[in-house]
Image: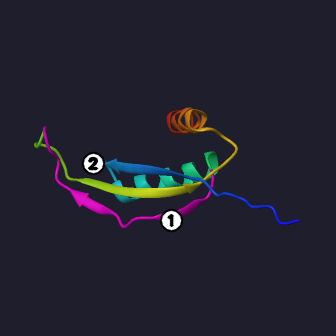
Amino acid sequence: IIKKVTIQHYYLLLGGNQGDRVNALQEASKKIEKGIGPIANTSLIYQTEAWGKTDQSDFLNQALIVSYTHLRAHETKANLVCRLLLE
């Protein structure tokens, strides 16, 4: 019997402009893998100028594709926010 498996993904966008920005993106990725699931792919890291309140540092931004876990979307968001705040 052949069972068709559908792989689902979450698309997450990361960004920040404070402290060691590259390290912050790397640490966030590690926490996402631990708390949600494996990262299937990442974008390059892009530097963008702040807009709106322009008297601040440039942002580093990155997109991640995270493989589906047993968690539903709202559970994934809550799980991720809790992990990032508590660690």
Which of the labelled discs sits on residue 17, or is there none? Answer: 2
User: How many marks overall?
Assistant: 2
Q: Secondary structure at mark 2?
A: loop
- For disc 1, the neighbor class at 10 Å (few under 14, some 14 to 19, many from 20) is few
x, y percent for residue 10? 52, 50
Residue closer to the observer: 14 or 84: 14
* First reached walking from the N terminus: tag 2 or tag 1: 2
Q: Quadrant of residue 67?
A: bottom right
| Quadrant in the picture for residue 8 | bottom right
Q: Amino acid at mark 2?
A: Asn
Q: Is residue 51 magenta?
A: yes
Mark 2 Cα within 10 Å, few/some/many (few <14, many 20+)? some
Q: Residue at x 14, y 44 (%)?
A: 51
User: What quarter of the picture does the C terminus occupy?
Assistant: top right
Residue sitting at the far left: 55
Residue interval drawn in magenta: 37-52
- State the residue at coordinates (21%, 56%): 48
In which quadrant is the N terminus drawn?
Answer: bottom right
Looking at the image, the residue that sits furthest to the front is 1
Whether residue 34 is situated above or below residue 53 in the rendered picture: below
The kind of secondary structure element at disc 1 is strand
3D distance between C-alphas at marks 2 and 1: 23 Å
Q: Residue at x 40, y 50 (%)?
A: 13
Mark linked to residue 8: none
Residue identified by numbered label 1: 41
Q: Does residue 5 appear left or right of residue 53 in this picture?
A: right
* 26 in the magenta segment: no
> In this orientation, which residue lies closer to the viewer: 17 or 39?
39
Viewer-closest of 39 and 16:
39
| Residue at horizontal 53 percent and vertical 36 percent from the top | 77
